Amino acid sequence: MLIFNKYKPLPQATQSNEEYLGTQIWQLKHVFFNEMSAIKNSTLKYLAFSKPFAEAFKLDDSILDKSRPILSSIDQEIEQQEQHIIINQLRNDSIYQSEKPNIDMYLMRKRPLTNPSTGDCVGILILAAKLDIGKERRVILRHFLGKQVPIGSTLPTSEFTQKQQQILTCILLGFQQRKDIAKILENMTNDNYNEIFIKNQLQTLYQKYNCTSLNELVDAVVSNYKNIGQFPGANLNEEVYNLK
């Protein structure tokens, strides 16, 4: 890291692992308090989290310094991922899709907290950010193509069925071939998808929004909805997660 000479850190006194962890929690409280942020210790128990993090992931102080139960395969994947971070002291970026009723997609940035005095990894810093897949397209439409795209949501996303939202998510991610969309959703949901079903759903959406092409449909959707992306609950790690 490049640092202006005036602010180069002075040599610090040796800190124990507990002292170093306390320092990181202090920084979380005073630096990341308004972001979705959290700290876990080396046994993967939450020691601190911000109010936005608690609201997003439905946590309260009853979970502090306690192990969370493994209730699903997703919970197991997350635990294995975080154990890998602790053991190997490696950073990890993944995408998490929350469960119903509030289905949202988050970028999860997890960083090992390594005490420079001992070389021990004492925990994990977690920084989360909610993803809006349509936001980039809205920005490009408005600022680079000069189209009049409203800011914000004007219609409820409940107008889409769950499967329609999943199909639209694939399209927003750049997948336009019906066979690719069917394969992705079949692998992620373990439900039966095929090209005919995708075609019929798209025709329904074309008629509903008076569109004749995918581009027209996507423009109509991102102009009127926010947070339309929906995949089933999953913790997707770019390095280790593979479609079947």
Image (cartoon, grey):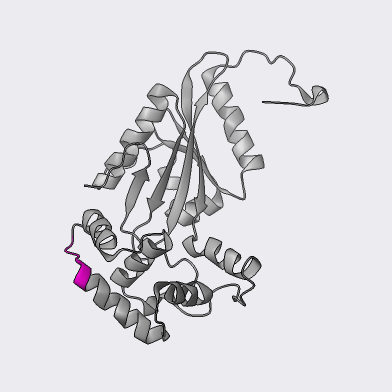
Residue depicted at 71% across the width and 26% down the height? 2
Counting labels gives 0
Q: Position of residue 10 (x, y in %)?
A: 75, 17
Q: In this view, does 134 lie to the left or right of 229?
A: right
Tell me where the magenta segment starts and ends, as one range.
Answer: 191-196
Q: Residue furthest left?
A: 192
Whether residue 69 is visible here, answered yes or no, is: no
Residue depicted at 58% across the width and 22% down the height? 19
Compared to residue 49, the image places residue 140 above or below, namely: below
Residue depicted at 41% across the width and 86% down the height? 210
Q: In which quarter of the image is residue 58?
A: bottom left
Q: Position of residue 110 (x, y in %)?
A: 47, 37
Pick whichever, 202 or 169, lies toward us: 202
Q: Position of residue 26 (x, y in %)?
A: 62, 34
Pick whichever, 52 or 154, lies toward us: 154
Q: Please name the predominant secondary structure of the magenta segment in the image.
A: loop
Pick whichever, 113 or 173, lies toward us: 173
Compared to residue 234, the image places residue 199 above or below, namely: below
Which image quarter is the N terminus in? top right
Give yes or no for residue 194 being in the magenta stretch.
yes
Compared to residue 158, the image places residue 181 above or below, namely: above
Q: Where is residue 138 in the image (x, y as percent from the top left)?
A: 56, 67
Whether residue 45 is visible here, answered yes or no, is: yes
Compared to residue 180, the image places residue 124 above or below, namely: above
Give yes or no for residue 210 being in the magenta stretch.
no
Pick whichever, 174 or 222, lies toward us: 174
Residue depicted at 76% across the width and 22% down the height? 8
Q: In which quarter of the image is residue 103?
A: bottom left
